[in-house]
Image (cartoon, rainbow, N blue to C red):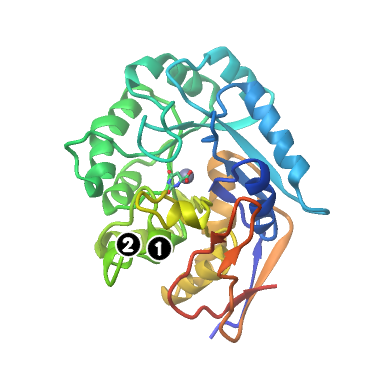
Amino acid sequence: MTQSLTLRRPDDWHLHLRDGAMLRAVLPETTRHFARAIIMPNLVPPVVTGADAAAYRDRILAALPEGADFTPLMTLYLTEDTDPDDLAAAHASGLITAVKLYPAGATTNSASGVQDFDRVRPVLERMAEIGCPLCVHGEVVDADIDIFDREAVFIDRVLDPIRRATPGLRVVMEHITTKNGVDYVKANDRDLGATITTHHLIINRNHILVGGIKPHYYCLPVAKREEHRLALRAAATSGDARFFLGTDSAPHTDPNKESACGCAGCFTATNTMALLAHVFEEESALDKLEGFASLNGPGFYGLPVNDATITLTRGDAVTFPDKIETEDGPVTVFDPGVPVHWHVA
Ligand code: DOR
Ligand code: ZN
C-alpha cells in the first residue's frame, strides 16, 4: 500500500474567496496547499470590469498570510452589458485569466448573470478571438425544468449551441455533476475542459436527504444520483487531461446554511487534498492524482505547472477542524462522513 505521495503543488481552478472578514478567514485555508486559484467573481456587487478585478485582486493580495506563495487568477463576471474592449484589455494585460458565465438566478449572487444568451454573443466572439476562456455555470433555470435535470438540459439547449456558434471559444464546464457532463466533454476533443469538485466525488443526493436534511451538503449544482457520482469518479481518476480540480469551495456562515432557506455551497478548502487522496486511493488511481490536481489545469489554461511540491502521507485517521471561525460567524468544514488517513505534510 502506498504510504507517501509527492505531487507538484496543486492549483484550484474554481474557488470562492468572498471579501472582507470572510476573505481574511478562508484565504489561509487555500494558500496552505494551493499555489494558484481561479477566483470566482460573484461578489455583491459582482466583479464586472477590469477595474473591479484589479481592486479585488489587491484586496486578496493584502489579505495573504505572511510568507504565502499564492497567485489569485482573476475572472470577470459576464453580464449582458459587459464591454468587450474592457474585457480584452484586462485579458491582454494578464489581469484576468477567464470570464465566468452565470445564467441569471442559477445560484448564489447570480442576479446580474445572463438571461438572453444572444446579447452576449459579441463578447463571446471577442473572447474566442483573443483566446480568453469562458468558465460556465452550466444549469438552466427554467421553472419547468427539474433541478436534477438542469445540467443535462443546459448542455443541449445552451452550451452546445453556443459552442457551435462560436468556433474557437475555449470553455470550462465548471463543477460538472452528471454523466451527461462527462460524456459531453469526452465527445469534444477541442477547446473544452471540465472542473470537478471534491465533494461531488464523495456525496450523492442521498447524502443530502436521507435520515434528515444535511444543509452542509447542499450546493449548486446539487449532487445527483449515484450513477453520476460514479461517472465523475471515473472521469477524475482516468488520467484524461480534460478533467481537473476546481473545488468550488464556497463558504457560508452556519446560520446562513442552517436555515429555512439555506445557502448553497460546500466549504472544502481545508481538507480537499486529503479527501482527494482518499478518493483516488479507493479508485486505485493514486498515480492519477497529480494529473487531476496539479497538471491538467495548467495544461488547459496554457500556464506552467508549479515547481514546488507537497507530500501526502498515509497514517492514522486525520482529525479535521469541524469549523473555522470568522468574524462573520463559524463556517463548517465539509465532512466526508468516513475516516480519512491522508495527511498533507
Ligand atoms: O454551491 C454553490 N455555491 N454553487 C455556486 O455556484 C455558487 C457558490 C457560492 O457562491 O456560494
Ligand atoms: Zn462556484
Q: Quadrant of ligand 1?
A: top left
Badge 2 marks a residue whose secondary structure is helix
The Cα atoms of the two marked residues, 1 and 2, are separated by 6 Å
- Residue at the limit of the structure toward the right, as seen here: 67
Residue shown at the point (29%, 61%) measured from the top left: 205
For the residues labelled 1 and 2, say whether their Cβ atoms are less than 8 Å apart: yes
Image spot of residue 2 (x, y percent): 56, 82
Residue shown at the point (45%, 22%) measured from the top left: 79
Can residue 238 be seen here? The reply is: no
Image spot of residue 272 (x, y percent): 55, 63
Q: Nearer the viewer, residue 159 or 332?
A: 332
First reached walking from the N terminus: tag 1 or tag 2: 1
On the image, numbered disc 2 is attached to which residue?
229
In the picture, which quadrant includes the C terminus?
A: bottom right
Badge 1 marks a residue whose secondary structure is helix
Looking at the image, residue 209 lies above or below residue 44: below
| Other residues around mark 1 within 10 Å, as few (<14) / some (14–19) / many (≥20) | many
Residue 201's mark? 1
Q: Quadrant of residue 207?
A: bottom left
Please give left or right for residue 300 compared with residue 184 in the image. right
| Other residues around mark 2 within 10 Å, as few (<14) / some (14–19) / many (≥20) | many
Looking at the image, residue 197 lies above or below residue 157: below
